[in-house]
Amino acid sequence: MLTKRLAPAALLTAVLLAGCNAPPTATGRATNDSAATRHFGKIAFEPCSLPGATGGQSTQALCATVQVPENPAVPDGRRIGLNIAWLAVAKGNGTADPVFFLAGGPGQAATEYAATVDAALREVRKQRDVILIDQRGTGKSNPLTCVGADGKEPPADDLDAADPQALATYAGRCAQSLADRADPRFYTTTEAVQDLETVRAALEVGSINLIGVSYGTRVAQQYAARYPTHTRAIVLDGVVPNDLVVGGEFAHTFENALALQTAQCAKLPACRQRYPTDLRAQLRRVMAKLNAAPVDVEYRDPGTSLTKRDTLTADTVTQLAFLFSYAPQSAALLPLVIDEADQGRYGPLMSLAQLISQSVGGQMSRGMQWSVVCAEDADRSSDDASAADTVLGSQVARMFFAACPGWPTGKRPADFNAPLKSAVPALLLSGELDPVTPPRYGAAVLAGLSNGRHQVLRGQGHNVSGTGCMPKLLGQFFETADAKALDLKCLDTLTYVPPFTSFNGWEP
């Protein structure tokens, strides 16, 4: 499928980290029409169970649908439903300013990460309700899923992942399949921000708090800029500056993350002895071998434990290396499986590649991602010759925008890429080893936030809201709206996860 073959281009930004007491309305209390239905402001919610994006236990919540115009300039035109979930405070009634969670991607659905959000915001929920909205084009908010006349996704197996024209043609077919229910031009960040404001007004609350992760930090900044009087506080986890060309720097940020991982290994005698070769050099060597001749590999399927055979390509290695570098726990496995592959033992690498494909497959709305990046980033992208010498190479950035010539493209406001300059209380979080949104992005955004604070978490990767004592700190921040007063000493216990030196784990 296209999703798998284009993973290095289509999934590189995809990562996240996500009872029923009545919350307040504008007058301070929610109302109950029945034992099941609960109102928050003007919105009637019903009990629901939210399945996890990767399986596991479901999360109990309250759900509703809010109708909004697809094209805000034509309020009497086609309307679409926004899927909303409400995680009520643990006990009693919440404060009058709930927390809105903004998912990443672009293309992830917030409600599909309810379990993750619930864990990261468990301290926040002692005082505040948490609202999750599937951004238009994702989840159950009129998803931009390509379907043909037979109700199935148009075939894409014959596409060459390195052929931009083929992807643009496919995107055009996809857009045609959506024509009777969606106009992709109106599924950008700008419309999503207006949706957030519509929901806030319908909840009948004067202000909201925002926590955005990865691409969701762009949405949070845009909302804070356009609705400053309704923004009480923001948390930006894995910060994306407004002027960043999403996808344009992946090759370099990943290369830098690999260099940091290699440097940490060199400080540990056992690791240095086990892996004397630079991880980047080994990756390039393995990819060169597979580019020259893909390998037929026998491996154990991680889902069924059955023995299977499949073809391992350089693209598979790229996808695995990039996605495994997002979190330190998975990154710890990367040197071992790459070293095994470098010695001709490809089974472990193929098993892990299948595991990651099964875990992330289907979690991204490709159409919504195209609507965002084609309108907001594509025209600002340019070829970067210096990326040719990186592990990912320059092709990844080109393919990230390859669909745009065939995809209906919306518009962005003239000031869309201007840095956020605001006095809003803000807590910015970065992982030291983040391969997608490195700490320098957070430092750049902090420059415009007079009441902001930026914290880099040692040894951590992409999205850190649920790491260590961060849930407690998030609860304190949303309570006080004062990032500079937070005592962050509890984060000093965070450290690096040493690479596995064998499949039995780390050997001190």
Image (spheres, helix red, strand yellow):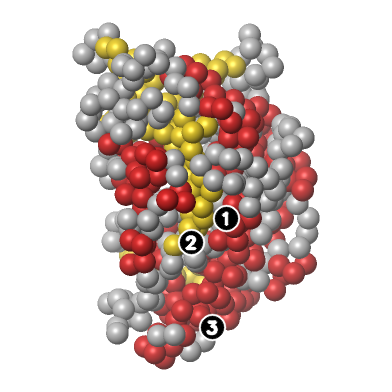
Q: Amino acid at mark 1?
A: Gly
Q: Amino acid at mark 3?
A: Asp
Which callout, 3 or 2, points at the residue further toward the start of the chain? Answer: 3
User: What is the number of the mark on residue 456?
Assistant: 2
Image location of residue 210, percent across then percent down? 48, 37
> Residue under circle 3?
278
Residue 219 visible, this angle: no
Q: Disc 1, disc 2: CB below 8 Å?
A: yes
Image location of residue 285, percent across then percent down? 58, 80
Image location of residue 40, percent across then percent down? 36, 18
Vertical order, 236 against 306 (above or below): above
For numbered disc 1, what is the local secondary structure?
Answer: helix
The residue at the point 46 percent across, 48 percent down is: 483
Q: Which residue occupies the foreground of this view, 210 or 403?
A: 210
Mark nearest the camera among 1 and 3 is: 1
> Residue under circle 1?
442
**Side of 121 where 439 appears, left or right:** right
User: What is the number of the mark on residue 8?
Assistant: none
Q: Kindly report the distance in space between the C-alpha atoms of the residues bearing marks 1 and 3.
A: 28 Å
Q: Which residue occupies the foreground of this view, 402 or 110?
A: 110
The residue at the point 55 percent across, 61 percent down is: 439
How many numbered dots are placed on residues in this image?
Answer: 3
Q: Which residue occupies the foreground of this view, 124 or 155?
A: 124
Image location of residue 21, percent across then percent down? 24, 24
Q: Amino acid at mark 2?
A: Val
The residue at the point 30 percent across, 43 percent down is: 123
For numbered disc 2, what is the local secondary structure?
Answer: strand
